[in-house]
Structure formats: structure tokens, C-alpha cells
Amino acid sequence: MTVAETSQPNFPLLGCSMDELDTPALCIDLSAMERNIRRMAELCRRHGVAWRPHSKAHKSPQIARMEIEAGALGVTCAKLGEAEVMAAGGVRDILVANQVVGPQKMRRLVDVCRQADLILAVDHVDQVRAISRATSAEGVSVRLIVEVDIGLQRAGAAPGEPTVELAKFIAAQKGVQLAGIMGYEGHLLTIADAEEKSRRIRDALAILKETRDALSAVGLPCPIVSCGGTGSYDVAMHCPGITELQAGGLIFMDAFYRHKCHVADFEYALFLLVTVVSRPAPDRAIIDAGRKSHHGDHHPSLVLGHEHDIRVTRLSAEHGELALGESARSLKIGDRLLLVPGYSDMTNVLHDQFYGIRNGRLEVVLPLVGRGRLQ
Ligand SMILES: Cc1ncc(COP(=O)(O)O)c(C=O)c1O
């Protein structure tokens, strides 16, 4: 048995039983996560699309390497700071699906270009000019992907002609290469009717294909057409013209993906281990995990094995309130429960590390190295 980490006084020993972990503790069921990773890699292989999982939910180069070993071609990041962490952790092919702007970032992105094969999303000539100036001055080159607004109304160039114009501009600059286009159909994930959801996603992604065709028509290369999230991968992978999927959160799954996005194919692999600290009324229990331990805005966290008789009803900063049905009233102070986070992405950033569990024992501690790398 080795000490997992010595900087904290009550840090657990590798190999210890899960019962010995202090709470709240964010745990990964390693076998379930590995099955989810293998499943997605296999689905992508079967459908002839590449997998570039978004790493915003795990922020861990170790997990990224597991995804790549299973067949992912690289990762997607939300921030340059996360890309730095991935590059330092040995990941080569990195898409920052976001606009990177400002002189401080120009210096840093040149450094990342020296370690990894970076792609940056752009939607305006001003971003391209600044990046091109920085990279060409240092003798490096970076791939650029045009982010196209396919209805999300976040960032993104308008599809069709405006994207073609931007792509032409990129193709004429030094220190940058046109890598393709991307879009995110994030506004369509929670449509309840399956048929309508599928149709609207297909319509949104058809915009990407039409834009790619418009680029080809003027002789511009478009090797990458990137899109897709956990809430939409199953439709996106069948859409013509799509070359890669960014879906990442499915390696963990959560209550939001399962119940609001209706994703059925992946297992819960992320759990928050909590302790009942108070039993103020027969139908009410208080746990040691509130808003600072899990995120329930998109969907309340669920209590594993008690989805029908316990509900998470209220979170204050450090207290979670549970409403107990008749069959859960024997719950007592000191009992431990496993919560399925309401939203894994926003839960994970509240924690320093994941506890990787296999067969009930702590196998590995995985720090969220990219956590807080917001710049
Ligand atoms: C650009 C982009 N791609 C993909 C995703 C999907 O990520 P996930 O599969 O983790 O939900 C998101 C989610 O916010 C996103 O912003």
C-alpha cells in the first residue's frame, strides 16, 4: 500500500476500501468509465467518424490518454489553459473550441504550438490577424477551424458566404492553416420528443455540410467538420459530412444527460460519496454535500439505489437536504450514500481530485490538473 498523496493530513491510502474515504468524495467507478470510453470509441469507429472528446468535464491528461488509447484522435478543450495542461501531459492533437484573444494568450499559444498540434476556433478576421502575426513572427504554424453558428447563437460566423469569406482570408495568411469548420448544436439537447430532436439536430448539422460544400466549391480545403455533444452524438454520428464528434461528458454520464437529454447508452460512472450528518425529521435528512460539492441547476443529483424514495430537495453551500419516502426512513446519522451528480461538468470543477475506485477499493487518485485554468 502506498500513500496516495501526502500534502493533506487525512489523505487516503491507495488500496484502501471506499468505506475508508472521508466525505464528500468525488469517485469514479473506473470499470464503468472504461466501458463508456470503449463504447464511444467503438461506436465512432463503426460509424466512420473520429472522436475528439471534450475534456472540460475531466480536465485530466491521464483520462485523456485513456481516451486516446481507446481510439480518440485527441481532445477538445474549452480554454487555452486547459490545452497547455493537455499538451504538457502528452496529448498531441488538441482543439480549443473557443476563441483565443489577447496578447498574453498569443505568447502562450506559440509555446503550445511547439509542443502539440493545436487547432483554434475563430469566427472573425480580427482573431485570425492576431494569431497569424504571433505565429508567423515565431516561425510556427497553427491550424484554425471556423466556428459556424448553427443556431446556438453563441459565438460563430454565419453559415455559407460569411464563413467562406473568413476561410479565404485564413487561407491567405501566414502562420495559419485552414483546418475546417465546427458547430455545436447545444440548443437542441433537451428537446423531449425524440423525433423532433433528431430532425432539428439533422437540420442544424446540414448547415455544416452545406457550408463545407460551399468551401469545396471555391477550392478551399475542409478536412475537419466537427460537432456533437453527449446529448446529441447519437444523431450527429449519422449525419452526412461530419468527420468528428466532440462528445465528452458521456464517459461519466449524469442525471442531466440521462433524464433531460434522454441519453440511455452510457453507464453512470461518477459518484459523490456523502455522509448523512443530521436527521432533523422522519422525512428529512441532511448530508455533508451542498452547492460547493455538487451542481444541480440542470437537474437535481440522484441518490443511487434510492431514485424512487429519496429526492435531493435543497442545497445550501455545505448542506444538502433529502426528502425521504416511507421506505427510506431508516436512514440514520453516519450512513453513507452515493449521489449521481445532477451535472457532472459543473460538479467536477468543485473538486481537487477524483478517487478512482475499482471493486470497492481506491486504485488511483486523479487530480483535475486543468481545473481553474480559465485563462
Ligand atoms: C463546443 C462544445 N462541444 C461539445 C460540447 C459537449 O460536451 P459534452 O459532451 O461534455 O456535454 C460542448 C458543451 O458545452 C461544447 O461547448
Image (tube, rainbow, N blue to C red):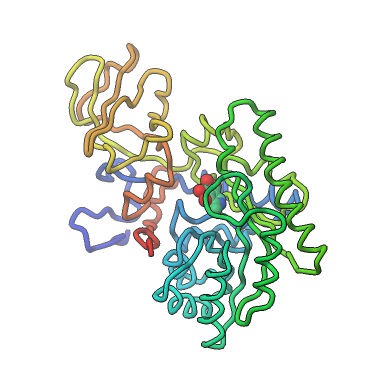
In the figure, residue 122 lies in which quadrant?
bottom right
- Residue located 68% across and 64% down the image: 180
Across and down, in percent, residue 247 comes to 58, 49
Left or right: 105 in relation to 128: left
In the figure, residue 67 lies in which quadrant?
bottom right
Residue lying at the far top in this picture: please name it.
326
- Residue located 27% across and 22% down the image: 331
Across and down, in percent, residue 82 comes to 44, 64
> Of 269 and 220, which appears nearest the observer?
220
Left or right: 273 in relation to 60: left
- Residue located 61% across and 37% down the image: 265
Q: Can you say which quadrant of the picture contains the N terminus? A: bottom left
In this orientation, does residue 248 appear?
no
Q: Above or below — where is 283 with respect to 316?
A: above
Q: Above or below — where is 44 with respect to 95?
A: above
- Residue located 62% across and 72% down the image: 143
> Of 175 and 169, which appears nearest the observer?
169
Q: Can you say which quadrant of the picture contains the C terminus? A: bottom left
Across and down, in percent, residue 214 comes to 78, 59
Across and down, in percent, residue 188 comes to 59, 37
> Of 198 and 272, which appears nearest the observer?
198
In the figure, residue 325 lies in which quadrant?
top left
Q: Above or below — where is 216 with respect to 353?
A: below
